[in-house]
Amino acid sequence: MRAIMVMFDSLNRHMLPPYGAEWVHAPNFERLYERTVTFDNSYVGSMPCMPCRREFHTGRYNFLHRSWGPLEPFDDSVPEILKQNGVYTHLVSDHYHYWEEGGATYHTRYTSYEASRGQEGDPWKGQVADPEIPESLGGRTDNSWRQDWVNRGYMDKEELQPQAKTFEMGLEFMRTNADQDNWFLHIETFDPHEPYFTQQHYKDLYPHDYSGPHFDWPPYREVQEPAEAVEHMRTENAALISMCDAYLGKVLDLMDEQDMWDDTLLIVCTDHGFLLGEHDWWAKCVQPFYGEIAHTPLFLWDPRTGRKAERSQALVQNIDWGPTLLEAFGVAPTPDMQGIPLTHSVASEVPLREGVLFGLHGGHVNVTDGRYVYMRAPTTAENWPLYEYTLMPTHMRHTFDVSELQETEMAVPFDFTKGCPVMKIPARGSGWTDMHRFGTLLFDLQDDPKQEHPIDDPEIEARMIRLMVDLMRANNAPVEQFERLGLTV
C-alpha cells in the first residue's frame, strides 16, 4: 500500500464544480470526482491552520484545551507512528507556519521533508528598501503586507511560485518511488489561502469589469467594500483555485502514468473554508463558523474498495484523516484517537457517529448532526473562565509572553496526556473578537443551507445541547468550557 494526501489551505467547498460551482474552471476537480468518493458532510474540527494539523496527527480535537500551537510531548503523531511501523513518510509543503515556533514540531515527525518558501508574509527574501506596492484595498497593518510584496518580486514566473515548487517536489517523490511500496506522501500547499497571487493566464479565465484599486487580500472584518470589489475578490479566489486545479491534475496524471490507482490511497482535503463576502463578512476566525468555513470538501480513493464517482453522506471530520491512513497500512490507532477511518464511514450504511464538534479556542463551540448546526456563544463578553492547557506555551510566531505565564498553575493530567500534568495558563483576552456579541445560533441546514435564517425551536435546541455536552465530555473538555458557555457539566 502507498498513500498520497494532497492538502490545500482555505479551499472553499462552494467554489468547486463537484459541489455545484460550475462557473469555476476546475476540470481536474471534476476528474477527481470521477475517481473518488466525494463527501457531502465533511466538517472542520479545530480552527484554524495548526490546530487542524494537530488534529490530523493526533486524531482528536485541539480547540477545547488550547489554541494554535505545536504538537505536545504527549501527542500521538500519525506520520511518526507510520514511520515507526516501517512506512516511509515524506512531507512537501510551502505552508510557512510549519517553520515558525507555533508549528515547529510537526514536520520533524516525518521520515523526510522538503519546503518551498515565499507564501503570504513568509519572512523569506530580505530587502531593506521598501518594495513598490500599488494603491490597494484591504492592506494588512502588520509587516506581512510589506513582506508579501517583497516576496512577489521573486516570483515573476509561475514555476517560481511556492505552489509550483511544492507540487514539483511531490511529483519528484512519486517518480523516484513509483516502484516502491509502503510509503506515504503528504503534499501540502498554502494556496488558495489569501493573498490570491497567481499568474495572469488564470485570471483571464474570469473576465469581468473592475476598475478599482488592487484587491487580492481580503481583510479579517465585515465587508466595507462595494459590490463590484466583492465580486472581483471572488474571481481572484477562483483564479487561484484554477491554479490549484492545474497542479492537482499533475498528480492525477502521474498516478495514471505510473499505474498507481491499483495500490495507492488518495485523500484530497483542506483545513477549512473562507468567507468571500457571504454573511457580509470576509475571512474566518472573527465571525461564527458558517458553512462556508466549516463545511469542507473531501475526496477519497481507496483501491481496496474501488468505489468511485459516488457521494457519501457520512458525517466526517479532519480528525478522521489520520486514522484512515493508519487503517490503510494495517496499523492500529492509539487509544486516544477518536477519528474514524473514512473507508468505514463509506462502507457502513449505519451512521458511525451522531454528531461532531467544531470551533476555535475561546470562540463558539459548535455541534452538528448533519441536519442542524448549533453554535453556542459565551455567556458574557468577558468570555471567562478560559485557560490554555499545554506543555508547549507557544503562539503562532512566538512563545507565550512572560506576562501570560505569571499566573500559571499545574493542572492534573487529562485522559489523553499520558499521565503528564500540564500548564494551566489564563487566556484572558484570548480569541479574535468578542464572540458573545453574535449570540447563540441554531440553523436547519435542510431548509436553510446558506444559514441565513436562525430558528428558535426549544426542543431542537435542547437536543443539540445534549449532543454538545455529551461530545464535550467524551473529549475530556475542561470544566470551565462548560461554565463559560452556560452549560451543565
Image: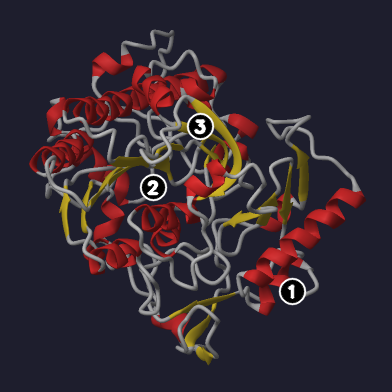
Is residue 152 positioned above or below 146 on the image?
above
Q: Residue at x 13, y 40 (%)?
A: 178
How far separated are the C-alphas under marks 2 and 3?
Answer: 29 Å
Tag of residue 392: none
Tag of residue 141: 2
Rendering coords of residue 179 (x, y %): 11, 42
Rendering coords of residue 479 (x, y %): 68, 78
Rendering coords of residue 2 (x, y %): 25, 47
Q: Residues at badges 2 and 3 in contact (C-beta under 8 Å)?
A: no
Rendering coords of residue 443 (x, y %): 76, 41
Q: Secondary structure at mark 3?
A: helix
Which one is earlier in the sequence, the residue at label 1 or at label 3?
3
Disc 1: CA contacts within 10 A as few (<14), some (14-19) or many (>=20): some
Q: Amino acid at mark 2?
A: Thr
Tag of residue 483: 1
Which one is earlier in the sequence, the residue at label 1 or at label 2?
2
Q: Which numbered mark, 1 or 3, is in the foreground of this view?
A: 3
Q: Please name the residue that numbered disc 3 is placed on.
A: 13
Q: Residues at badges 1 and 2 in contact (C-beta under 8 Å)?
A: no
Q: Residue at x 79, y 69 (%)?
A: 487
Q: Secondary structure at mark 2?
A: loop
How far separated are the C-alphas under marks 1 and 2?
Answer: 35 Å
Is residue 139 positioned above or below 199 on the image?
below
Q: Amino acid at mark 3?
A: Arg
